[in-house]
């Protein structure tokens, strides 16, 4: 059943086309909360356009902790970026224009289908319990995509079933960094929203043959970024988690709604820093933002890239500015941009390079060991220090 939270007594009739005939209208947050508590089978709450935004977000945030399968759709008279960002951060699945009945009906259909999947009543989405790792930096040019691609390639090459998702929907470089010619992209997932399954994910994947890594590329047209709703990203990552050991998410250097959605379902956030003041300042702001959003400090790790560059800053200075420890240091090397220009992953092309060793150390200790793999006797293969596979 759908709960409609709205002050207007006529609202139930206004939205009947989209909500169906069994919707229950309530006019206060306490009554909505009580109804949800009394009936655990409730699957959807639609919040009317005149409900205060903060009150709506408070309800969504409370409920997503206790019952993440519950869908919350927010109606607004006018859509704006600030309200959209606040709503999505709180756990609202979609924000819809109040006078667009067709859009509301579509949002309801997608939410119900996603709830069925999350509750285990929908299509089976694999038997794995994979980990989602989001790689983020608050400034461009710090090596984030190089880090994402090489970590993902390394994990795939040692036997872990790994997916790399390029979430920089406007200017993603994952495909070109690996010399891939993708036939599909994240944009193609939109058509499967609400009923995405294993087969759907595989239909948009491009294989990196050298490592066995699967990649979902960013759209070729930057305009397509606006055509990918954030709830589609959440659905994609949750379905992919059932198919893969690790899902690595590469991101743009900003808090887009898609990045916020990825943070919301991630098991680990890898934050990339470099030895320059703007990058450190932006990362400090990003960390403060994650704290404000309630993100777990234990589920993030900081990596210092080009850590030995002679630029007047030292790793200790970065730790002091960030007020957080650096977990891994990756050295500077001219080999890295050369490998990027050739479209090869340095961890495979030059496995004895200090950068390759540092990235493998990062993946082994900050990802594999964190999530319970036995690095000595585990089933997955590991590299020797001399570049071969054991």
Image (spheres, rainbow, N blue to C red):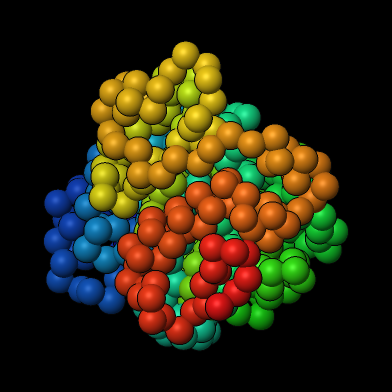
Work out whether 159 lies above or below 225: below
Give 287 or 17, whichever is nearer the viewer: 287
Give 296 or 94, whichever is nearer the viewer: 296
Q: Position of residue 77 (x, y in %)?
A: 48, 35
Q: Position of residue 69 (x, y in %)?
A: 35, 68
Query: Which quadrant would residue 115 be assigned to in this image?
Result: bottom left
Work out whether 355 lies above or below 265: above
Please give the name of the residue rendered at 38% of the width and 56% of the height, measured from the top-left corner: 366
Please give the name of the residue rendered at 43% of the width and 62% of the height, measured from the top-left corner: 364
Quarter that holds the C terminus: bottom right
Q: Position of residue 191 (x, y in %)?
A: 69, 64
Give 359 or 127, whichever is nearer the viewer: 359
Q: Is residue 201 left or right of residue 10?
A: right
Q: Is residue 73 left or right of residue 28?
A: right
Please give the name of the residue rendered at 35% of the width and 44% of the height, measured from the top-left corner: 327
Number of on-image labels: 0
**Residue 283 seen in this snapshot:** yes
Work out whether 116 lies above or below 20: below
Please give the name of the residue rendered at 50% of the width and 30% of the height, measured from the top-left corner: 308
Q: Position of residue 54 (x, y in %)?
A: 28, 35
Query: Which quadrant would residue 248 be assigned to in this image?
Result: bottom right
Quarter that holds the N terminus: bottom left
**Residue 11 seen in this snapshot:** no
């Amino acid at each position: 059943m759908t709960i409609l939270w709205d002050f207007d007594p006529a609202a139930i009739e206004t939205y009947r086309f989209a909500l169906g005939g069994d919707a229950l209208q309530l006019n206060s947050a306490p009554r909505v909360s009580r109804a949800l508590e009394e009936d655990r089978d409730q699957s959807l709450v639609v919040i009317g356009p005149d409900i205060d935004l903060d009150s709506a977000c408070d309800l969504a945030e409370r409920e997503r902790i206790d019952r993440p399968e519950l869908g919350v759709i927010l109606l607004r008279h006018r859509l704006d970026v600030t309200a959209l960002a606040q709503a999505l951060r709180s756990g609202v699945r979609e924000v819809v224009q109040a006078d667009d009945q067709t859009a509301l009906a579509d949002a309801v259909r997608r939410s119900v289908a996603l709830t069925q999947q999350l509750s285990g009543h929908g299509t089976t989405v694999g038997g794995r319990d994979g980990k989602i790792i989001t790689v983020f930096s608050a400034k461009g040019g710090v090596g984030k995509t190089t880090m994402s691609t090489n970590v993902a390639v390394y994990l795939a090459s040692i036997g872990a079933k790994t997916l790399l998702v390029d979430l920089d929907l406007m200017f993603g470089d994952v495909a070109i960094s690996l010399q891939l010619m993708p036939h599909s992209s994240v944009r193609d997932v939109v058509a499967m929203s609400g009923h995405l399954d294993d087969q759907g994910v595989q239909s948009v994947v491009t294989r990196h043959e050298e490592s066995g890594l699967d990649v979902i590329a960013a759209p070729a047209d930057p305009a397509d970024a606006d055509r990918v709703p954030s709830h589609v990203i959440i659905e994609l990552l949750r379905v992919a988690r059932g198919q893969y050991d690790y899902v690595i998410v590469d991101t743009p250097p900003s808090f887009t709604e898609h990045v916020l959605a990825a943070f919301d379902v991630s098991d680990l956030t890898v934050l990339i820093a470099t030895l320059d003041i703007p990058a450190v300042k932006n990362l400090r702001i990003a960390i403060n933002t994650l704290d404000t959003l309630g993100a777990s400090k234990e589920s993030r790790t900081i990596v210092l890239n080009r850590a030995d560059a002679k630029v007047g800053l030292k790793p200790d200075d970065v730790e002091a500015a960030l007020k957080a420890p650096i977990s891994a240091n990756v050295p500077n090397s001219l080999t890295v941009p050369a490998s990027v220009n050739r479209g090869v992953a340095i961890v495979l092309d030059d496995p004895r390079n200090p950068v390759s060793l540092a990235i493998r150390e990062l993946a082994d200790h900050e990802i594999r060991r964190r999530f319970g793999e036995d690095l000595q006797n585990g089933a997955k293969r590991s590299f020797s220090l001399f570049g071969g596979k054991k």
